[in-house]
Image (cartoon, grey):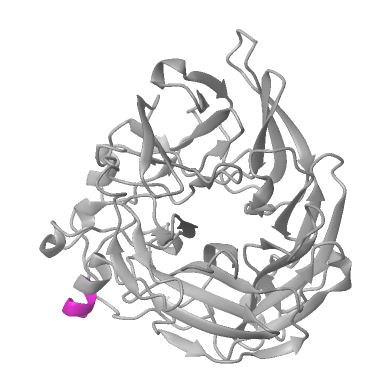
């Protein structure tokens, strides 16, 4: 079913409408004081729309063109740059001056003129590895951008050794070895049940790949790693040829499907995989996993139903048990679906994670900010994953927070010694701001707020890189 691309050329106004521009702001306005020990760059992705998607695309927020924001911190000042990733898809649509690609991950709805053009939008995540800045979207291979200018360099296939047709937007970089553990699903093309896991060394060359079959064609949006294992959940957002032929976006929530979790030993092969099965759960992003004796513990935000508020839970997999079920327990009622941590502790025992949270007890000023509605992600919470204890930063009554990231302080003394930062949408001013909070004193409020003279669309994901990380870029 090819989509009808007639109708309004651009979307109606509103905070989340397309921004449709590249630009820079030198020496941004700052309220408060940028910490003297914060040197580096916060990179974030957003889905922006050069041309609007279709009315029946319920996954519109994930089907826009990739746009990178870069906040560079140096000597107490911040410079901003934002640029589109010049994908084959965006280049084709700019040449035609109209929308050519249909609903989310359904090439059957595309304009026939782009049948042979890669439809990857490069709009989900951004990672630095092996001297390359990769922009990721799970239905295609990465695009490379310059870490200083954000200029697009082209697609990347790891020296021709990444044979999967796609790479997920959620690789894991081992903080000990420097290896990147990444994967593709539907790895032999749309609707295939193949999963391919890769280990890429610090030099950017593929060291190992493992191919195996998924139990059903469901979404595999994220993975977790421990020191010994790779944890690969298959979630009950499913698809089929019949669904694509009907003109719908790829995914459909089907709670009759179980959650299936593959445990792959990092030194093993496909024959060593063990599958665990659990009730249908709505979850896409995972925080951390650790080996505890002969068990694996994985922490993640989980909803029992498709749109219910999430909680941070712990899944425990007993590798000695002959039972294929896993244990589930609540760590925290913090309800944000995006949970981050100090990535230097990835795969290892840790104490804290950071999440957005909708705190109904906080004021929401819909008179000054009518577009905000009655609900907003109005706090960042630091959660102690061992005790459940939380501390909160409240952003204000007219803002909504996006994904938090953790930036370690230079010469950090412990896991939480650093800053939590993220973009806030200011609905009263119709502008965006970057808030910076001391991770060890969340209640004290923002240390500094970087104010942009325009708004950004809601972000997908981002990462912090210190100046040392980029020293030789």
Image coordinates of residue 15 in percent, x first then y, are 54, 79
Q: Would you say residue 241 is visible in this rendering?
A: yes
In the foreground, 231 or 238: 231
* 42 in relation to 57, above or below: below
Q: Is residue 316 left or right of residue 178?
A: right
| Residue 437 image-quadrant placement | bottom right
Residue drawn where x is 39% and y is 71% of the image: 146
In the foreground, 317 or 264: 264
Residue drawn where x is 78% and y is 58% of the image: 381
Q: Is residue 185 left or right of residue 124?
A: left
| Residue 282 image-quadrant placement | top right
Residue found at the far front of this picture: 472
Most prominent secondary structure in the magenta stretch?
helix
Image coordinates of residue 143 in percent, x first then y, are 34, 61
Q: Is residue 12 left or right of residue 140?
A: right
* 221 in relation to 51, above or below: above
Query: What residue span does the magenta drawing correspond to?
Result: 93-98
Is 360 a magenta residue?
no
Residue drawn where x is 62% and y is 62% of the image: 403
Image coordinates of residue 64 in percent, x first then y, are 38, 67
């Amino acid at each position: 079913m090819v989509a009808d691309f007639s109708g309004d050329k651009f979307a109606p106004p509103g905070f989340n409408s397309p921004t449709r521009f590249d630009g820079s702001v030198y020496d941004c306005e700052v309220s408060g004081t940028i910490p003297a020990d914060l040197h580096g760059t916060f990179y974030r992705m957003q889905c922006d729309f050069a041309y609007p998607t279709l009315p029946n695309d319920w996954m519109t927020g994930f089907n826009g063109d990739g746009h990178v924001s870069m906040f560079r911190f140096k000597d107490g000042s911040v410079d901003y740059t934002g640029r589109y990733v010049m994908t084959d898809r965006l280049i084709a649509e700019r040449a035609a001056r109209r929308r050519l690609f249909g609903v989310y991950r359904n090439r059957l709805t595309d304009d026939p003129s782009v049948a042979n053009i890669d439809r990857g939008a490069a709009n989900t995540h951004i990672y630095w590895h092996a001297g390359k800045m990769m922009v990721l979207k799970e239905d295609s291979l990465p695009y490379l951008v310059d870490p200083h200018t954000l200029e697009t360099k082209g697609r990347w296939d790891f020296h021709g050794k990444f044979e999967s047709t796609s790479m997920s937007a959620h690789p894991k970089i081992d903080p000990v070895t420097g290896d990147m553990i990444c994967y593709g699903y539907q790895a032999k093309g749309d609707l295939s049940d193949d999963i391919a896991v890769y280990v890429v060394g610090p030099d950017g060359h593929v060291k190992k790949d493992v191919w195996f079959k998924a139990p059903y064609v469901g979404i595999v949006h994220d993975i977790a790693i421990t020191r010994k294992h790779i944890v690969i959940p298959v979630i009950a957002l499913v698809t089929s040829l019949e669904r694509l032929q009907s003109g719908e976006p790829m995914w459909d929530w089907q709670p009759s499907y179980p959650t299936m979790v593959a445990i792959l030993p990092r030194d093993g092969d496909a024959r060593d995989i063990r599958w665990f099965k659990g009730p249908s759960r709505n979850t896409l992003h995972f925080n951390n996993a650790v080996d505890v004796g002969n068990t694996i513990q994985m922490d993640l935000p989980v909803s029992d139903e498709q749109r219910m508020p999430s909680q941070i839970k712990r899944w425990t997999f007993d590798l000695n048990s002959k039972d294929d079920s896993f244990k589930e327990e609540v760590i925290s009622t913090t309800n944000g679906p995006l949970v981050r941590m100090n990535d230097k502790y990835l795969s290892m025992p840790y104490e804290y994670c950071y999440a957005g949270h909708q705190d109904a007890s906080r004021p929401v000023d819909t008179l000054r900010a009518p577009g905000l509605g009655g609900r907003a992600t109005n706090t960042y919470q630091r959660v102690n994953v061992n005790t459940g204890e939380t501390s909160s930063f409240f952003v204000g009554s007219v803002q909504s927070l996006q994904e938090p990231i953790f930036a370690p302080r230079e010469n950090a003394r412990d896991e939480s010694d650093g800053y939590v930062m993220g973009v806030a949408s200011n609905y009263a001013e119709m502008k965006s701001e970057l808030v910076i909070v001391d991770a060890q004193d969340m209640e004290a409020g923002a240390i500094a707020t970087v104010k942009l003279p325009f708004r950004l669309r809601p972000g997908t994901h981002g990462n912090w890189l210190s100046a040392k990380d980029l020293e030789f870029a």
